Amino acid sequence: MNKLIGQYPDASGHFGPYGGRFVGETLMSALLDVEAAWASVKNDPAFMATYHALLRDYAGRPTPLDCATRLSDHLGGARIWLKREDCTHTGAHKINNVVGQGLLARHMGKRRVIAETGAGQHGVATATIAARFGFECKVFMGAEDIARQAPNVRRMELLGAQVIPVQSGTRTLKDAMNEALRYWSSASEDTFYVIGSVAGPHPYPEMVRNFQRVIGDEARARFLEKNNRLPDLLVACVGGGSNAIGLFYPFLDDPCEMIGAEAAGDGLDTPRHAASISGGSPGELHGSISYLLQNDEGQIHEAWSVSAGLDYPGVGPEHALLHDLKRVRYEGVTDEEAIAAFQLLCKYEGIIPALESAHALAAAIRVAPQRSRNENILVCLSGRGDKDLDHVTRYLKEAKGRKSE
Ligand SMILES: *Cc1c(COP(=O)(O)O)cnc(C)c1O
Protein backbone atom coordinates (compact mmCIF):
# COMPACT_ATOMS: atom_id res chain seq x y z
CA MET A 1 0.00 0.00 0.00
CA ASN A 2 1.28 3.47 -0.87
CA LYS A 3 1.69 5.85 2.02
CA LEU A 4 -1.31 8.18 2.30
CA ILE A 5 -0.36 10.39 5.25
CA GLY A 6 1.25 13.57 3.98
CA GLN A 7 0.47 12.80 0.30
CA TYR A 8 -2.76 14.78 -0.11
CA PRO A 9 -3.74 17.40 -1.03
CA ASP A 10 -1.17 18.38 -3.66
CA ALA A 11 0.04 21.98 -4.00
CA SER A 12 -3.11 22.98 -5.91
CA GLY A 13 -5.38 21.53 -3.23
CA HIS A 14 -6.34 18.39 -5.14
CA PHE A 15 -6.97 14.98 -3.63
CA GLY A 16 -6.44 13.01 -6.84
CA PRO A 17 -9.21 14.24 -9.17
CA TYR A 18 -11.16 15.84 -6.28
CA GLY A 19 -10.95 19.08 -4.30
CA GLY A 20 -9.32 22.16 -5.85
CA ARG A 21 -10.49 25.76 -5.78
CA PHE A 22 -13.14 26.76 -8.30
CA VAL A 23 -14.16 30.29 -7.37
CA GLY A 24 -14.32 33.79 -8.85
CA GLU A 25 -11.56 36.37 -8.60
CA THR A 26 -12.67 38.17 -5.45
CA LEU A 27 -13.05 34.97 -3.47
CA MET A 28 -9.76 33.72 -4.88
CA SER A 29 -7.81 36.54 -3.24
CA ALA A 30 -9.52 35.88 0.13
CA LEU A 31 -8.67 32.18 -0.18
CA LEU A 32 -5.07 32.87 -1.13
CA ASP A 33 -4.71 34.97 2.04
CA VAL A 34 -6.10 32.13 4.15
CA GLU A 35 -3.84 29.64 2.36
CA ALA A 36 -0.74 31.75 3.01
CA ALA A 37 -1.65 32.25 6.69
CA TRP A 38 -2.42 28.55 7.10
CA ALA A 39 0.89 27.58 5.43
CA SER A 40 2.75 29.82 7.86
CA VAL A 41 1.20 28.23 10.98
CA LYS A 42 0.52 24.60 10.16
CA ASN A 43 4.01 23.46 11.05
CA ASP A 44 4.69 26.20 13.58
CA PRO A 45 5.23 24.62 17.02
CA ALA A 46 4.21 27.83 18.85
CA PHE A 47 0.87 28.11 17.01
CA MET A 48 0.12 24.42 17.44
CA ALA A 49 1.05 24.58 21.14
CA THR A 50 -1.46 27.41 21.65
CA TYR A 51 -4.08 25.36 19.77
CA HIS A 52 -3.47 22.27 21.92
CA ALA A 53 -3.44 24.33 25.13
CA LEU A 54 -6.87 25.75 24.25
CA LEU A 55 -8.19 22.30 23.41
CA ARG A 56 -7.05 21.14 26.83
CA ASP A 57 -8.04 24.13 28.95
CA TYR A 58 -11.16 25.34 27.11
CA ALA A 59 -12.52 22.36 25.16
CA GLY A 60 -11.73 19.67 27.74
CA ARG A 61 -9.37 17.41 25.80
CA PRO A 62 -8.18 14.70 25.70
CA THR A 63 -11.55 12.98 25.48
CA PRO A 64 -11.99 9.47 26.95
CA LEU A 65 -11.55 6.22 25.02
CA ASP A 66 -13.25 3.21 26.56
CA CYS A 67 -14.70 -0.19 25.74
CA ALA A 68 -18.49 -0.40 25.57
CA THR A 69 -18.46 -3.77 27.33
CA ARG A 70 -22.16 -4.26 28.03
CA LEU A 71 -23.10 -3.30 24.48
CA SER A 72 -20.36 -5.58 23.08
CA ASP A 73 -21.51 -8.50 25.26
CA HIS A 74 -25.11 -7.94 24.22
CA LEU A 75 -24.16 -8.06 20.53
CA GLY A 76 -21.82 -11.02 21.05
CA GLY A 77 -18.70 -10.55 18.94
CA ALA A 78 -16.04 -7.92 18.44
CA ARG A 79 -15.40 -5.39 21.23
CA ILE A 80 -16.73 -1.92 20.49
CA TRP A 81 -14.65 1.03 21.73
CA LEU A 82 -15.92 4.61 21.88
CA LYS A 83 -13.90 7.78 21.29
CA ARG A 84 -15.95 10.24 23.32
CA GLU A 85 -16.12 13.54 21.40
CA ASP A 86 -19.47 14.06 23.15
CA CYS A 87 -17.48 14.91 26.30
CA THR A 88 -16.00 18.12 24.87
CA HIS A 89 -17.19 21.65 25.66
CA THR A 90 -20.31 22.23 23.48
CA GLY A 91 -20.71 18.45 23.18
CA ALA A 92 -19.30 17.60 19.76
CA HIS A 93 -16.09 17.40 17.74
CA LYS A 94 -16.88 20.70 15.97
CA ILE A 95 -15.14 22.63 18.77
CA ASN A 96 -11.73 21.22 17.64
CA ASN A 97 -12.09 22.90 14.26
CA VAL A 98 -13.41 26.26 15.43
CA VAL A 99 -10.67 26.61 18.04
CA GLY A 100 -8.11 26.15 15.25
CA GLN A 101 -9.77 28.48 12.76
CA GLY A 102 -10.46 31.05 15.49
CA LEU A 103 -6.75 31.12 16.33
CA LEU A 104 -5.90 31.50 12.65
CA ALA A 105 -8.39 34.38 12.31
CA ARG A 106 -6.76 36.11 15.29
CA HIS A 107 -3.31 35.43 13.83
CA MET A 108 -4.44 37.11 10.59
CA GLY A 109 -5.66 40.15 12.53
CA LYS A 110 -9.35 39.62 11.65
CA ARG A 111 -11.96 40.98 14.02
CA ARG A 112 -15.07 39.42 12.55
CA VAL A 113 -15.97 35.85 11.68
CA ILE A 114 -18.78 34.39 9.59
CA ALA A 115 -20.03 30.82 9.29
CA GLU A 116 -22.71 28.79 7.52
CA THR A 117 -24.87 26.40 9.46
CA GLY A 118 -27.54 23.81 8.72
CA ALA A 119 -28.68 22.16 11.92
CA GLY A 120 -27.07 24.98 13.87
CA GLN A 121 -24.28 22.96 15.47
CA HIS A 122 -21.45 24.62 13.56
CA GLY A 123 -23.11 28.01 14.05
CA VAL A 124 -23.16 27.44 17.80
CA ALA A 125 -19.52 26.29 17.78
CA THR A 126 -18.45 29.37 15.80
CA ALA A 127 -20.49 31.70 18.05
CA THR A 128 -18.82 30.05 21.04
CA ILE A 129 -15.31 30.69 19.81
CA ALA A 130 -16.26 34.21 18.66
CA ALA A 131 -17.31 34.99 22.23
CA ARG A 132 -14.12 33.42 23.58
CA PHE A 133 -11.91 35.51 21.26
CA GLY A 134 -14.04 38.67 21.19
CA PHE A 135 -14.92 38.50 17.47
CA GLU A 136 -18.08 39.90 15.96
CA CYS A 137 -19.98 36.94 14.49
CA LYS A 138 -22.55 36.47 11.72
CA VAL A 139 -24.03 33.04 10.99
CA PHE A 140 -25.80 32.37 7.70
CA MET A 141 -28.66 29.92 8.07
CA GLY A 142 -31.41 28.85 5.67
CA ALA A 143 -34.83 30.21 6.65
CA GLU A 144 -36.20 26.66 6.59
CA ASP A 145 -33.50 25.52 9.03
CA ILE A 146 -34.10 28.52 11.31
CA ALA A 147 -37.70 27.39 11.68
CA ARG A 148 -36.64 23.76 12.35
CA GLN A 149 -33.76 24.47 14.74
CA ALA A 150 -35.08 27.14 17.08
CA PRO A 151 -33.04 26.10 20.19
CA ASN A 152 -29.74 26.48 18.31
CA VAL A 153 -30.81 29.89 16.99
CA ARG A 154 -31.42 30.95 20.59
CA ARG A 155 -28.02 29.57 21.64
CA MET A 156 -26.21 31.52 18.92
CA GLU A 157 -28.00 34.73 19.83
CA LEU A 158 -27.28 34.22 23.51
CA LEU A 159 -23.60 33.82 22.60
CA GLY A 160 -23.72 37.18 20.87
CA ALA A 161 -23.92 36.08 17.23
CA GLN A 162 -26.22 37.52 14.60
CA VAL A 163 -28.16 34.83 12.71
CA ILE A 164 -28.85 35.85 9.12
CA PRO A 165 -31.77 34.09 7.41
CA VAL A 166 -31.09 32.91 3.85
CA GLN A 167 -34.13 32.91 1.58
CA SER A 168 -32.62 31.56 -1.66
CA GLY A 169 -32.95 28.05 -3.13
CA THR A 170 -34.34 25.43 -0.78
CA ARG A 171 -33.46 27.75 2.16
CA THR A 172 -31.20 25.12 3.72
CA LEU A 173 -27.49 24.45 4.32
CA LYS A 174 -26.20 24.56 0.73
CA ASP A 175 -27.88 27.95 0.22
CA ALA A 176 -26.47 29.24 3.51
CA MET A 177 -22.96 28.25 2.36
CA ASN A 178 -23.45 29.95 -1.03
CA GLU A 179 -24.59 33.10 0.76
CA ALA A 180 -21.67 33.01 3.23
CA LEU A 181 -19.19 32.68 0.33
CA ARG A 182 -20.89 35.56 -1.49
CA TYR A 183 -20.83 37.79 1.59
CA TRP A 184 -17.20 36.92 2.31
CA SER A 185 -16.04 37.93 -1.17
CA SER A 186 -16.97 41.54 -0.32
CA ALA A 187 -15.95 41.51 3.37
CA SER A 188 -12.72 39.49 3.53
CA GLU A 189 -10.64 42.55 4.47
CA ASP A 190 -11.60 42.22 8.16
CA THR A 191 -13.59 38.97 8.13
CA PHE A 192 -12.56 35.32 8.40
CA TYR A 193 -14.84 32.58 7.07
CA VAL A 194 -15.00 29.60 9.46
CA ILE A 195 -16.11 26.59 7.35
CA GLY A 196 -17.70 23.78 9.35
CA SER A 197 -16.45 20.62 7.67
CA VAL A 198 -13.75 19.24 5.35
CA ALA A 199 -15.62 20.71 2.37
CA GLY A 200 -15.37 23.91 0.32
CA PRO A 201 -12.37 25.25 -1.62
CA HIS A 202 -8.67 24.70 -0.82
CA PRO A 203 -7.21 25.12 1.82
CA TYR A 204 -10.30 24.32 3.95
CA PRO A 205 -10.45 20.53 3.45
CA GLU A 206 -6.82 20.18 4.49
CA MET A 207 -7.00 22.77 7.28
CA VAL A 208 -10.15 21.32 8.87
CA ARG A 209 -8.71 17.80 8.61
CA ASN A 210 -5.57 18.88 10.43
CA PHE A 211 -7.64 20.55 13.17
CA GLN A 212 -9.74 17.37 13.56
CA ARG A 213 -6.93 14.79 13.41
CA VAL A 214 -6.52 15.30 17.16
CA ILE A 215 -9.40 12.79 17.44
CA GLY A 216 -7.42 10.05 15.69
CA ASP A 217 -4.07 11.01 17.19
CA GLU A 218 -5.47 10.73 20.72
CA ALA A 219 -7.46 7.58 19.96
CA ARG A 220 -4.48 5.81 18.35
CA ALA A 221 -2.10 6.60 21.22
CA ARG A 222 -4.61 5.70 23.93
CA PHE A 223 -5.73 2.49 22.22
CA LEU A 224 -2.11 1.35 21.88
CA GLU A 225 -1.47 2.22 25.50
CA LYS A 226 -4.45 0.20 26.70
CA ASN A 227 -4.21 -2.78 24.32
CA ASN A 228 -0.69 -2.87 22.96
CA ARG A 229 -2.10 -3.21 19.45
CA LEU A 230 -4.16 -1.24 16.95
CA PRO A 231 -7.93 -1.56 16.49
CA ASP A 232 -9.05 -3.79 13.61
CA LEU A 233 -11.81 -1.54 12.34
CA LEU A 234 -12.61 2.18 12.63
CA VAL A 235 -16.12 3.55 12.13
CA ALA A 236 -17.33 7.15 11.93
CA CYS A 237 -20.36 8.93 10.50
CA VAL A 238 -19.94 11.10 7.41
CA GLY A 239 -21.85 14.33 6.82
CA GLY A 240 -19.26 16.65 5.30
CA GLY A 241 -16.78 14.18 6.75
CA SER A 242 -14.78 16.10 9.37
CA ASN A 243 -15.12 13.80 12.39
CA ALA A 244 -14.53 10.78 10.13
CA ILE A 245 -11.35 12.11 8.52
CA GLY A 246 -10.25 13.33 11.95
CA LEU A 247 -10.43 9.76 13.27
CA PHE A 248 -9.19 8.01 10.11
CA TYR A 249 -6.28 10.20 9.04
CA PRO A 250 -3.64 9.15 11.60
CA PHE A 251 -4.49 5.47 10.87
CA LEU A 252 -4.41 5.69 7.05
CA ASP A 253 -1.05 3.93 6.76
CA ASP A 254 -1.98 1.28 9.37
CA PRO A 255 -3.53 -2.11 8.57
CA CYS A 256 -6.95 -1.05 9.94
CA GLU A 257 -10.24 -1.42 8.08
CA MET A 258 -12.42 1.69 7.94
CA ILE A 259 -16.11 2.32 7.43
CA GLY A 260 -17.69 5.73 6.79
CA ALA A 261 -21.39 5.64 7.70
CA GLU A 262 -23.50 7.85 5.44
CA ALA A 263 -27.10 8.79 6.22
CA ALA A 264 -29.34 6.57 4.08
CA GLY A 265 -32.53 8.19 5.44
CA ASP A 266 -35.53 6.19 4.19
CA GLY A 267 -33.16 4.02 2.10
CA LEU A 268 -30.68 4.42 -0.77
CA ASP A 269 -33.40 3.24 -3.19
CA THR A 270 -35.57 6.24 -2.23
CA PRO A 271 -34.91 9.97 -2.93
CA ARG A 272 -34.88 10.64 0.82
CA HIS A 273 -31.26 10.16 1.89
CA ALA A 274 -27.99 12.09 2.35
CA ALA A 275 -25.47 9.50 1.12
CA SER A 276 -23.31 11.52 -1.28
CA ILE A 277 -20.82 8.73 -1.97
CA SER A 278 -23.03 5.60 -1.87
CA GLY A 279 -25.90 7.37 -3.62
CA GLY A 280 -24.34 10.28 -5.55
CA SER A 281 -21.84 11.10 -8.32
CA PRO A 282 -18.87 13.46 -8.84
CA GLY A 283 -19.50 17.14 -9.56
CA GLU A 284 -18.70 20.65 -8.34
CA LEU A 285 -20.24 22.35 -5.32
CA HIS A 286 -19.02 25.26 -3.17
CA GLY A 287 -15.78 25.67 -5.08
CA SER A 288 -14.54 22.11 -5.02
CA ILE A 289 -15.05 18.76 -6.74
CA SER A 290 -16.38 15.73 -4.93
CA TYR A 291 -19.31 13.32 -4.80
CA LEU A 292 -22.68 15.08 -4.69
CA LEU A 293 -26.38 14.38 -4.63
CA GLN A 294 -27.45 15.68 -8.04
CA ASN A 295 -29.65 14.87 -11.00
CA ASP A 296 -28.49 14.28 -14.60
CA GLU A 297 -28.38 18.05 -15.26
CA GLY A 298 -26.11 18.64 -12.24
CA GLN A 299 -28.92 20.17 -10.18
CA ILE A 300 -28.29 19.57 -6.48
CA HIS A 301 -30.79 17.35 -4.67
CA GLU A 302 -31.86 18.23 -1.18
CA ALA A 303 -30.32 15.85 1.34
CA TRP A 304 -32.55 14.09 3.83
CA SER A 305 -31.82 12.38 7.14
CA VAL A 306 -33.42 12.01 10.57
CA SER A 307 -30.20 13.59 11.77
CA ALA A 308 -30.01 17.24 10.70
CA GLY A 309 -26.21 17.31 11.06
CA LEU A 310 -25.71 14.78 8.27
CA ASP A 311 -27.85 16.35 5.55
CA TYR A 312 -25.22 18.11 3.45
CA PRO A 313 -25.59 17.19 -0.26
CA GLY A 314 -21.79 16.92 -0.72
CA VAL A 315 -18.85 15.32 1.06
CA GLY A 316 -15.22 16.31 1.61
CA PRO A 317 -12.93 15.62 -1.39
CA GLU A 318 -10.53 13.47 0.63
CA HIS A 319 -13.36 11.00 1.27
CA ALA A 320 -14.09 10.88 -2.47
CA LEU A 321 -10.46 9.87 -3.03
CA LEU A 322 -10.41 7.33 -0.18
CA HIS A 323 -13.56 5.81 -1.68
CA ASP A 324 -11.99 5.52 -5.14
CA LEU A 325 -8.82 4.03 -3.61
CA LYS A 326 -11.02 1.57 -1.67
CA ARG A 327 -9.18 2.58 1.50
CA VAL A 328 -12.47 3.35 3.28
CA ARG A 329 -15.82 1.59 2.76
CA TYR A 330 -18.76 4.00 2.68
CA GLU A 331 -22.04 2.41 3.75
CA GLY A 332 -25.56 3.78 4.09
CA VAL A 333 -27.32 3.62 7.47
CA THR A 334 -31.08 4.24 7.49
CA ASP A 335 -32.97 6.43 9.95
CA GLU A 336 -34.48 3.30 11.47
CA GLU A 337 -31.08 1.66 12.08
CA ALA A 338 -29.69 4.87 13.58
CA ILE A 339 -32.61 5.22 15.99
CA ALA A 340 -32.23 1.58 17.08
CA ALA A 341 -28.51 2.15 17.72
CA PHE A 342 -29.31 5.35 19.65
CA GLN A 343 -31.62 3.38 21.95
CA LEU A 344 -29.13 0.53 22.45
CA LEU A 345 -26.35 2.89 23.55
CA CYS A 346 -28.65 4.63 26.02
CA LYS A 347 -29.79 1.32 27.46
CA TYR A 348 -26.50 -0.58 27.62
CA GLU A 349 -23.92 2.14 28.25
CA GLY A 350 -25.69 5.10 29.83
CA ILE A 351 -24.62 7.36 26.98
CA ILE A 352 -27.09 9.39 24.90
CA PRO A 353 -25.38 9.79 21.50
CA ALA A 354 -26.04 12.43 18.85
CA LEU A 355 -28.21 11.01 16.07
CA GLU A 356 -25.28 11.63 13.72
CA SER A 357 -23.01 9.47 15.89
CA ALA A 358 -25.76 6.83 16.14
CA HIS A 359 -25.22 6.24 12.40
CA ALA A 360 -21.59 5.25 13.07
CA LEU A 361 -22.69 3.06 15.93
CA ALA A 362 -25.31 1.35 13.75
CA ALA A 363 -22.66 0.50 11.13
CA ALA A 364 -20.50 -1.01 13.91
CA ILE A 365 -23.48 -2.92 15.34
CA ARG A 366 -24.02 -4.55 11.93
CA VAL A 367 -20.44 -5.81 11.81
CA ALA A 368 -19.66 -6.67 15.45
CA PRO A 369 -21.64 -9.96 15.72
CA GLN A 370 -19.84 -11.34 12.62
CA ARG A 371 -16.39 -10.80 14.14
CA SER A 372 -14.53 -12.66 16.88
CA ARG A 373 -14.29 -11.46 20.46
CA ASN A 374 -10.58 -10.80 19.88
CA GLU A 375 -11.31 -8.10 17.33
CA ASN A 376 -11.74 -4.44 18.24
CA ILE A 377 -13.94 -1.84 16.57
CA LEU A 378 -13.26 1.81 17.35
CA VAL A 379 -16.26 4.11 16.87
CA CYS A 380 -16.12 7.91 16.88
CA LEU A 381 -18.94 9.14 19.10
CA SER A 382 -18.93 12.56 17.46
CA GLY A 383 -21.40 14.26 19.79
CA ARG A 384 -23.99 14.03 22.54
CA GLY A 385 -27.67 13.55 21.90
CA ASP A 386 -29.43 15.91 24.28
CA LYS A 387 -30.25 18.09 21.26
CA ASP A 388 -32.04 15.13 19.63
CA LEU A 389 -34.40 14.00 22.39
CA ASP A 390 -37.55 15.68 21.00
CA HIS A 391 -36.74 14.41 17.55
CA VAL A 392 -36.26 10.81 18.68
CA THR A 393 -39.43 10.89 20.78
CA ARG A 394 -41.41 12.17 17.79
CA TYR A 395 -39.84 9.58 15.46
CA LEU A 396 -40.69 6.71 17.80
CA LYS A 397 -44.27 7.94 18.24
CA GLU A 398 -44.74 8.18 14.47
CA ALA A 399 -43.10 4.76 13.93
CA LYS A 400 -45.51 3.26 16.45
CA GLY A 401 -48.38 4.91 14.56
CA ARG A 402 -47.13 3.42 11.26
CA LYS A 403 -46.95 -0.06 12.78
CA SER A 404 -50.47 0.01 14.22
CA GLU A 405 -52.05 1.23 10.95
C1 LIG B 1 -21.99 18.26 12.44
C2 LIG B 1 -21.94 16.92 13.05
C3 LIG B 1 -21.59 15.77 12.31
C4 LIG B 1 -21.36 15.80 10.83
O1 LIG B 1 -20.26 16.57 10.41
P1 LIG B 1 -18.91 15.91 9.88
O2 LIG B 1 -18.20 17.04 9.25
O3 LIG B 1 -19.29 14.83 8.90
O4 LIG B 1 -18.22 15.36 11.05
C5 LIG B 1 -21.48 14.57 12.96
N1 LIG B 1 -21.74 14.46 14.28
C6 LIG B 1 -22.09 15.53 15.03
C7 LIG B 1 -22.36 15.34 16.49
C8 LIG B 1 -22.20 16.79 14.44
O5 LIG B 1 -22.56 17.84 15.19
Image (spheres, rainbow, N blue to C red):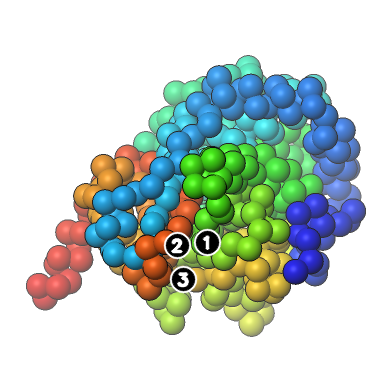
Q: Amino acid at mark 2?
A: Glu
Q: Residue at x 59, y 35 (%)?
A: 96
Q: Which residue is more in the foreground, 209 or 326?
A: 326
Q: Is mark 3 within 8 Å of ligand 1?
A: no
* SS class, disc 1: loop
Q: Quadrant of residue 47?
A: top right
Instruction: Tell me the mark number nearer the camera, choosing from 3 and 2.
Output: 2
Circle count: 3
Return the mark for residue 50: none
Vertical placement of residue 106 versus 317, above or below: above
Q: Are marks 3 and 1 in contact (CB under 8 Å)?
A: no
Q: Which residue is more in the foreground, 400 or 117?
A: 400
Q: Quadrant of residue 360?
A: bottom left
Return the mark for residue 232: 1
Q: Are marks 2 and 1 in contact (CB under 8 Å)?
A: yes
Q: Amino acid at mark 1?
A: Asp
Q: Quadrant of residue 192?
A: top right
Say which quadrant the C terminus sits in: bottom left
Identify the residue position indicated by label 3 in the image.
Answer: 332
* Residue 142 % position (x, y): 52, 49
| 164 horizontally vs 208: left or right | left
Between the C-alphas of marks 3 and 2, the distance is: 23 Å
Identify the residue position indicated by label 2 in the image.
Answer: 375
Q: Amino acid at mark 3?
A: Gly
| 367 horizontally vs 33: left or right | left
